Image (spheres, rainbow, N blue to C red):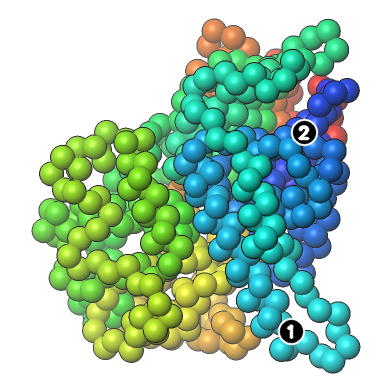
Amino acid sequence: MKISFLGAASEVTGSQHLIETGRLRVLLDCGMFQGSRAEARHKNEEFRCEPKRLDAVILSHAHIDHCGLLPRLYAQGFRGQVFCTDATADIAEMMLMDSARIQAEDAEYLARRLKPGHPPVKPLYSEEDVDGLLKRMQPIVFDEWHELSDDFRLRLHPAGHILGSAIVEMEIADRDTVKRIVFSGDLGRRGMPLLVDPAPVQGCDVLITESTYGNRVHPPPSDLKEDLLRIIEKTVGSGGRVIIPAFSLGRTQQVVYYLNELFNERKLPRIPIFVDSPLATRLTKIFRRYDHTLDADVHRTLRKDRDAFGFDSLTYTGSRKESIAINALDEPLVVISASGMCEGGRIVHHLKHGVADERNTIVLMGYQAPHTLGRQIAERRKYVRIYDRDTPLQACVEQLEGLSAHADVEDFKWWFRQMSEDSHIGQAFLVHGEPDSARGLASILRDYCDEEPIVPELYETFQV
């Protein structure tokens, strides 16, 4: 059996891992690389997994860096099935359609700016490709074995990372043996708002685990609720606005859930609060649809509050006109808008209007990738690049890590301990982490597995 690491190897984006036997070719995730435009284009255009020859894709969850190239895979000939949870299938439909529209808009924008004779920049895929891919998706339920062929069976467990996210457990026949392989996807944290904790999984012959925060301990999520209140009260007192770049999926819903709690506790200042992201609005409806899968705190909230994601002073904006009107308001407010790394969407407009005002506060939550506007703001540069212009950064910048959806060192230790308690971990590979994080987690994982953990480089292949 061979495992090739075709994305998210020694980096934190573009998850894609290929498992091959003599009779089976399965891809774990098919994520889009996110980073500088030139590098992203180069990595996203070509596949090394031979799409036409793939038997299946196992999708751990619907973040774009895990599912974002599925329509391109379809466009290049993939006709197998994509196995995932129900919620992941519903979320992926919205995420991928939104991605196709953004690419079309970007291509149109670039066409107007390119010099005559420059080759046109085409979208990676179209809405028609998304439609074709969606017909290949096969939702399966958690915690049940699914026999996909004589050589392959699959079981998904809650990962606690985002709604619908899964830990992937596989048993694959290879010659005269059956190997158990576990893929963490993006492992979530224990005790987070909204989501159930990641599930413990029995040991395995091969473990592929993410390592995003493999050398970090997160602050407790409960602290973040008080931090949000502190920041809002301080900024309101100065007459400014709070600008929160937040991913439409997961992070926005967690922030709104905390604000809803503060509203119910009568602590939240009476100011306008906006979720300015059509995608986040649509995704929040999916959270409401699957609220029975959320954690016990949400169930307790819903016994006394019919909507955990809405309150009187909160507005979900829809049209571009409504979005533009927010920046015309001359009063304290909070705006939550995508994207989380400030690389596109309506948040860029809010930052353009707000970064130079010292009364304002920009609240960054979680990892900011290199070369992104979010990283420039996180580094508190004197000037940041917005729409090809250098703009002075005079707003206050706050970084809150409490809502990271990725496991930290303590979560990983707990999960590895559960996995190895009555069984074993054979060979382990650490992916989806920058080198320091991956190596840090490898030093911990060494105590739980039979062989020295490996941090693969991009495009490396291993026999297991």
Specify the quadrant that holds the N terminus: top right
Q: Which disc is residue 55 wearing?
A: 2
N-terminal-most mark, 1 or 2: 2
444 or 106: nearer the viewer: 106
Residue 430 as seen in the image, left or right of residue 218: right
Residue plotted at (49% across, 38% down): 86
- The secondary structure type at the circle numbered 2 is loop
Give the quadrant of residue 122: bottom right
Q: Which amino acid does label 1 sit on?
A: Ala
Q: Is residue 56 visible?
A: yes
Q: Which disc is residue 111 wearing?
A: 1
Q: Position of residue 29 (x, y in %)?
A: 67, 41
Q: Which disc is residue 34 wearing?
A: none
Sort mark 1 into few (<14), some (14-19) or many (20+) by Cα contacts within 10 Å: some
- The secondary structure type at the circle numbered 1 is helix
Residue plotted at (40% across, 32% down): 197
